[in-house]
Amino acid sequence: MNGATARREREKRDPEATRQALLQAGAALFSERGFDGVSIEDLAGRAGVNKALISYHFRGKRRLYVAILESAFAAMADRLKEIEAAAPDAREGLRAFLAAFEQMTRERAGFPTLFLREVLSTGIEPVLAPHLVEIVGVSRRLGERGAREGIFRKVDPVLLHLGLVGALVFFFATEPARRKAEAAGLAPFAMPAPKAFLRYLEELTLRGLAPENRSRHSPGPAPDPPSRSRPGLARQGRPSSARRKGARA
């Protein structure tokens, strides 16, 4: 049995494995080159399958591309809803919300880049809309819960979603470029690690959305201690009238 025959037999025995191989190959290639930069032959070669199976499983390259996006957004929505249900409070919910995006990026290579490419090129596919609505819903309820628990002031849920997700998508979509620049010695400073960025974004959100009375009364920098070389100087005010008269005399 030659290699092509063995491959066809394997595809017949496990069609789901073939489908998953195409999804993984497509996610990697589309994120690297964009939709127009990837051919049917490229996809089949990366997946190790016959190119006819792309039409069989997905009815063409565009349908494969949309299936990759839909699978990623559906998985993201499901994960965020699970996090929402398990979080004991809004603070922990925020931390888990942010961490979920990093985990998603590690599990699905190129997800943030694919998302940006899709939005910039053709807009949002209608099939993705229900999953996006679910993701925005988690952000909205997170903001409402934070307001009830006193860690957030009342905030526009769409702005909260855009602030969080926009920062996350941009950071992880540009991560490969930052790594290349650092490896080539082009960056004169150390690039932030993902964990450090997530901690920063969490702190920025908690401080930036803190209730006004809390932010107004939050402790500021500690005052400088009084000088030790001249004790009591800090307690001195304007000289008394008697001292002023004595000075004139």
Image: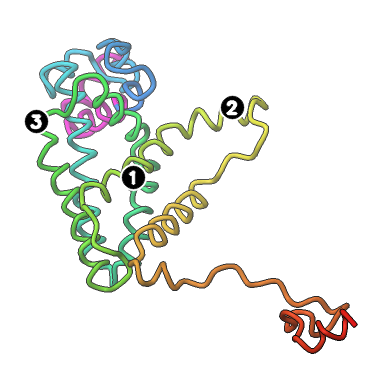
- Asked whether the residues under the numbered discs 1 and 2 touch, taking CB atoms below 8 Å apart as contact, a structural biologist would say no
Q: Is residue 92 magenta?
A: no
Kind of residue sitting beneath label 1: Met
6 with respect to 105 (left or right): left
214 with respect to 61 (left or right): right
Per the picture, the main secondary structure of the magenta-coloured stretch is helix
Which span of residues is magenta-colored? 1-26
Which residue position is annotated with label 2?
181
Which residue position is annotated with label 3?
126
Q: Quadrant of residue 223?
A: bottom right
192 with respect to 96 (left or right): right
Nearer the observer, 148 or 242:
242
Earlier in the chain: of badge 2 and badge 3, it is: 3
Residue drawn at 29 percent across, 67 percent down? 90
Residue drawn at 67 percent across, 32 percent down? 188
- Other residues around mark 3 within 10 Å, as few (<14) / some (14–19) / many (≥20): few
- Label 1 vs label 2: CA separation? 24 Å
- Other residues around mark 2 within 10 Å, as few (<14) / some (14–19) / many (≥20): some
Location of residue 166 with respect to 19 vertically, above or below: below
Q: Nearer the viewer, mark 1 or mark 2?
A: 2
Which residue position is annotated with label 1?
104
